[in-house]
Amino acid sequence: MNPVTRRSVLAWAVAGSAAATAGLSGCSDQRAVVVTGQVDRVRAGAYRDMVISGVEQVRDLWGRDRVVLPIRLHLPRSAAQWSQATGHPVVERGYAGTTVRRPGQEPVVVIHPDAWDALTPQGRAAVVTHEITHLAMGSSGSAPWWLAEGLAEYTAHRASDADPARIAGSALPRLLADPPSGWPQAAASTSAWQGYASAWLACVFLAGEVGEQALLEAHTRTHAGSSWQDVCRASLGRPASQLHRQWITWLQSVDRQSA
Ligand SMILES: [Zn+2]
């Protein structure tokens, strides 16, 4: 059986992050994180610290109980080992991390070996926090793709003081050049960042518009089977189509402010 995975992308070179470096209160670092793989001690230690910081960020938004420790992190040394651990193709451009869930086993976050060289320290941390957010969300539910991925990115960049246009980069003007009539969709792997950035921008807008907790609740409801349209009407107080129009208007204002 193929493992069920969610992926985050290598597109974070510009992203800032105010990640804390404090350890987890009440837990020793050793018990909070299990790192496996054949990488050097420096890299393994850096990733261990990123997990500890990422857990704090996820807990700060989603709640302490949503993150179950220890976090299992696997660091393949080669693309072949990545493929073996994830079931993904050996040549898979652009993906930095993924969460692998196999029946009867604890979920494992697997980091692509190229991520270390391709990303800034902030970008590496964002990938780790993105994947820990998926752990907090739980195994595959029926939430829309853009809501699950957008919220994972939102969590990863929530502490950043970089403005949205800077983090989104070229994805924002590309999005506005042909504004979508619906909510974001996954893009082809060659331009995966376009889909992830669009999903993230949707969640930045929605968190500001309806509030973070209402947005998380909307995720929980869709994850459990409600439709996005129903959740908008029943919980967010307006039709999804109205929120979508507001999102596009907000994108245009973000773009103007960054010009
Ligand atoms: Zn993801």
Image (cartoon, rainbow, N blue to C red):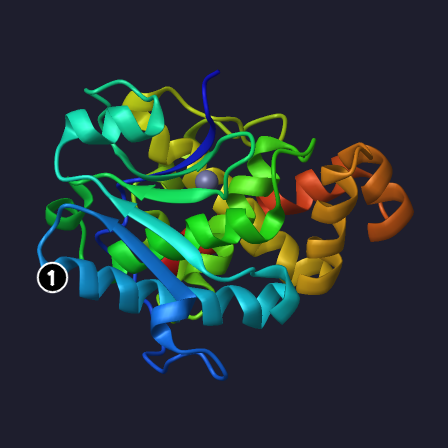
Quarter residue 241 falls in:
top right
The tally of labels here is 1
Taking 227 as reference, is 193 left or right? left
Packing grade of label 1 (10 A; few <14, some 14-19, many >=20) is few
| Apparent side of residue 173 relative to residue 202 in the rendered image (left or right) | left
Q: Pinpoint residue 88: horizontal percent, then vertical percent.
A: 32, 22
SS at circle 1: helix
Q: Is residue 150 left or right of residue 245?
A: left
Residue 106 x/y as whole percent: 50, 44
Residue that sits furthest to the right in the current view: 234
**Residue 226: x percent and y percent?**
82, 35
Q: Is residue 257 visible?
A: yes
Q: Give the residue displayed 68% in from the left and 39% down from the top.
A: 244
Q: Which residue: 28% across, 22% down? A: 190
> Is residue 251 in view?
no
Note whether 220 is above or below 92 in the view shown.
below
In terms of depth relative to the viewer, which is nearer, 223 or 179? 223
Query: Residue lying furthest front in this view?
Result: 104
Residue 163's spot in the image, x, y percent? 39, 63
Q: Residue at x 35, y 35 (%)?
A: 193
Question: Quick check: 58 left or right of 212?
Answer: left
Disc 1 under 8 Å from ligand 1? The reply is: no
Q: Which residue is mark 1?
A: 41
Q: Nearer the viewer, residue 33 or 66?
A: 33
At 34% from the left and 21% from the top, the residue drawn is 87
Where the C terminus falls, by quadrant?
bottom left
Mark 1 residue type: Arg
